[in-house]
Image (cartoon, rainbow, N blue to C red):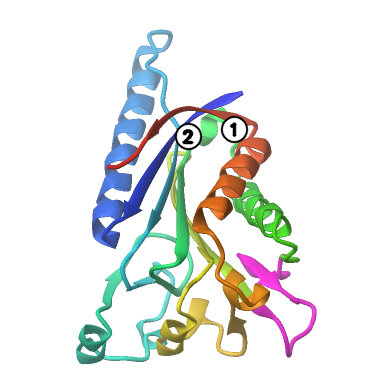
């Protein structure tokens, strides 16, 4: 079983969480470089799984187009939202209250050297967690994330966005699952650069507010199962 440190960061500014991820990744990469230099005198790297919520924020992936943000700086301020260009994959997305953001910072040397498999397994965690609430999440061929009714072009809607970065086989960034998210904020962007598909949430699909803690419990359980890991520590806050 691989060891994973779980941390619940609560509601945290996007840039603060990003900086924290970068700090962990830098330390992990430094250990890996040290290990290659000294051979048998190795310092073991650690794996992390972070949960948080962000205040209203739009983030653009490194392959995204700024034209997919449909409002200007003044409108961002009026909506109490911020905007960041990031170093993750993917295009533009929204984070905000009522959404569970998961950041797995894993040294894939402990797992496998396959970023595509990593994304598929992240999707599997979401699909299994949605199934706990009788929501049928699926993959959309050729696209990343988890969808509802992906085979119907008129009904297909995205419930979970994903975007990751991998440096020396150390991952960062992750997924954003819409639970009780205010979906109106997605009207200000072309989500993930896809202009002909809708966005949804667990609340919208079920017609009722969903307990975030229950969803988090399922996500942790399925992460542990899919990645064949065990949690070795939990810290309440950053």
**Is the N terminus in the top left, top right, bottom left or bottom right quadrant?**
top right
Q: Which mark is residue 30?
A: none
- Residue drawn at point x = 38 percent, y = 88 percent: 67
- Residue drawn at point x = 30 percent, y = 30 percent: 30
User: Furthest residue to the right?
Assistant: 151
Specify the segment rendered in magenta. Answer: 139-157
User: Furthest residue to the top?
Assistant: 40
Mark 1, residue position: 111
Residue 227's x, y, as percent? 63, 37
Secondary structure category for the residue under label 1: loop
Between 222 and 70, the one nearer to me in the picture: 222
Secondary structure category for the residue under label 2: loop
- Residue drawn at point x = 28 percent, y = 75 percent: 83
Q: Count residues near mark 2 (Cα–Cα under 10 Å), then give few for <14, some for 14-19, many for 20+.
A: many
Q: Is residue 204 left or right of residue 148?
A: left
Would you identify the image quadrant in which residue 32 lies?
top left
Q: Is residue 70 above or below residue 40?
A: below
Q: Is residue 57 above or below residue 108?
A: below
Pointers 2 and 1 in contact (C-beta within 8 Å): yes
Tell how many labels: 2
Task: Note whether residue 134 is visible.
Answer: yes
**Is the C terminus in the top left, top right, bottom left or bottom right quadrant?**
top left
Dominant SS type (magenta): loop
Q: Count residues near mark 1 (Cα–Cα under 10 Å), then give few for <14, some for 14-19, many for 20+.
A: some
Residue 157's x, y, as percent? 65, 79
Residue 60's x, y, as percent? 38, 72
Q: Is residue 132 above or below residue 82?
A: above
Residue 171's x, y, as percent? 46, 45
Mark 2, residue position: 107
Would you identify the image quadrant in which residue 79 lies?
bottom left
Q: Is residue 234 located in the magenta-colored stretch of the structure?
A: no
């Amino acid at each position: 079983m691989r060891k994973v440190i779980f941390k619940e960061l609560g509601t945290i500014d996007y840039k603060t969480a990003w900086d924290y991820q970068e700090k962990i990744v830098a330390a992990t990469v430094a250990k890996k470089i040290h290990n290659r230099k000294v051979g048998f005198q190795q310092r073991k790297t650690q794996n992390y799984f972070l949960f948080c919520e962000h205040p209203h924020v739009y983030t653009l992936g490194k392959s995204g187009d700024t034209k997919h943000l449909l409002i200007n700086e003044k409108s961002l301020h009026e909506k109490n939202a911020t905007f960041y260009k990031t170093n993750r994959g993917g295009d533009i997305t929204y984070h905000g209250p009522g959404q569970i953001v998961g950041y797995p910072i894993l040294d894939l040397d402990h797992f496998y050297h396959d970023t595509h498999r990593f994304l598929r397994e992240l999707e599997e965690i979401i699909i299994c967690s949605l199934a706990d609430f009788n929501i049928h999440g699926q993959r959309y061929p050729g696209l990343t994330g988890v969808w509802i009714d992906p085979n119907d072009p008129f009904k297909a809607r995205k419930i979970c966005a994903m975007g990751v970065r991998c440096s020396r086989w150390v991952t960062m960034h992750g997924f954003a699952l819409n639970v009780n998210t205010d979906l109106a904020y997605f009207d200000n962007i072309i989500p993930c650069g896809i202009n002909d598909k809708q966005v949804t949430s667990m609340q919208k699909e079920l017609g009722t507010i969903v307990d975030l803690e229950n969803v988090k419990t399922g996500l942790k359980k399925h992460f542990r199962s899919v990645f064949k890991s065990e949690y070795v520590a939990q810290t309440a806050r950053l």
